[in-house]
Image (cartoon, rainbow, N blue to C red):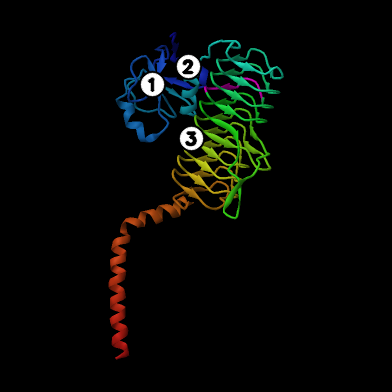
Amino acid sequence: MQGKSLKELAAHVGGTVIGNGEIIISSVSTLENAEPGQITFLSNERYEPMLKTTAASAVIVGHQSECPGSLLVADDPYYAFMQIVVLLHGHRPHKTVGISDKASVAETAILGKNCQVGDFVTISDNAKIGDNCYFYPGVFVGPGVEMGEGCIVYPNAAIYDKTIIGSRVIIHANATIGQDGYGFATHKGVHHKIPQIGKVILEDDVEIGSNAAIERATLEDTVIGKGSKIGDLVAIGHGTRIGPHCLLVPQVGISGSTTLGHHCVLGGQAGVVGHIKIGNMVRVGAKSGVMNSIDDGVTVIGSPAMEAGKAKRVLGSMPGLPDMRKRIKVLERAMARLEKERKV
């Protein structure tokens, strides 16, 4: 791997070098595991003591700090680190395979230029695929699916009929897009399936994690907004609308007909009930249970979820509840004696 000088990396990210700008950097690593010839980063002050012991040749930081190696000072160290990782290592390469003889591409399907279709891929009738899309083995693309350019679909992902997908969308292995929503009408003890006639829309630059499931809706569309990233094993119910640039960490579950604003972050295993509205830039802590709508900019934690400051006070008082219960019982007995004496 051909390396770059630290001053070249600084120029690439718009940063400043403190130390030896001529040193050659060939790869990246963590603060703890970095070796000479590597660059790492510090974006969390909690790990600042490790700057003094890291063996990295250079560290990306937000301000000048004490470090045995050279520093690359950048406004956003983590973003600068990302840019350097891409420059030095690049993204995963995809082998040029053309259209495999083992794939099944319908005569009415339209494929753009330079699409790569692996073994046992199925592209159904009237599907429209943009340029430079890559389909790994075992992918299913249903009838009438529309897909923009530069998309990557990993092995065994299933895209149901009439799903609309923007450009540069990444769908990881075994994800399912557009399956029927969980909708049933119960009559006299029997659950009758409701046809799901809406569709799923993934806007540009969305990424869907492995084994995630995005349901189509009974009537309206399920929409994942531009630039949002959906983690592994996330379930999104029918008719839900996720705003642009949201982050849903693995194992999040969102019930149907819920709306999220832009730049929301939901921690792992958070659960959200249906038919509520979550505002813009809301943060939901891991394992939280969201039962009610949330205003813009609020951070909630706990189950049921509540504003973070209040939740911390509630959770902080829980270890003392057994002693508090004992004291209350003592007070109740004392009050009972006083009441008895007063009546005498």
Magenta span has 106? no
Q: Residues within 10 Å of mark 1 (few under 14, many from 20)?
A: some
Residue designated by label 1: 29
Residues at marks 2 and 3, CA–CA distance in whole angstroms: 36 Å
Residue designated by label 3: 233
Q: Return the disc, 3 or 1, that comes first in the chain's sequence.
A: 1
Q: Residue at x 50, y 16 (%)?
A: 90
Q: Amino acid at mark 2?
A: Leu
In this picture, residue 341 sits left or right of residue 222: left
In this picture, residue 294 sits left or right of residue 327: right
Which stretch did the figure color magenta? 147-155
Q: Return the disc, 2 or 3, that comes first in the chain's sequence.
A: 2
Q: Residue at x 32, y 29 (%)?
A: 50
Which dot, 3 or 1, sits closer to the camera? 3
Q: Check disc 3 and report its element: helix, strand or loop.
A: loop
Residues at marks 3 and 1, CA–CA distance in whole angstroms: 28 Å
Q: Tell me where residue 224 sits by quadrant.
A: top right
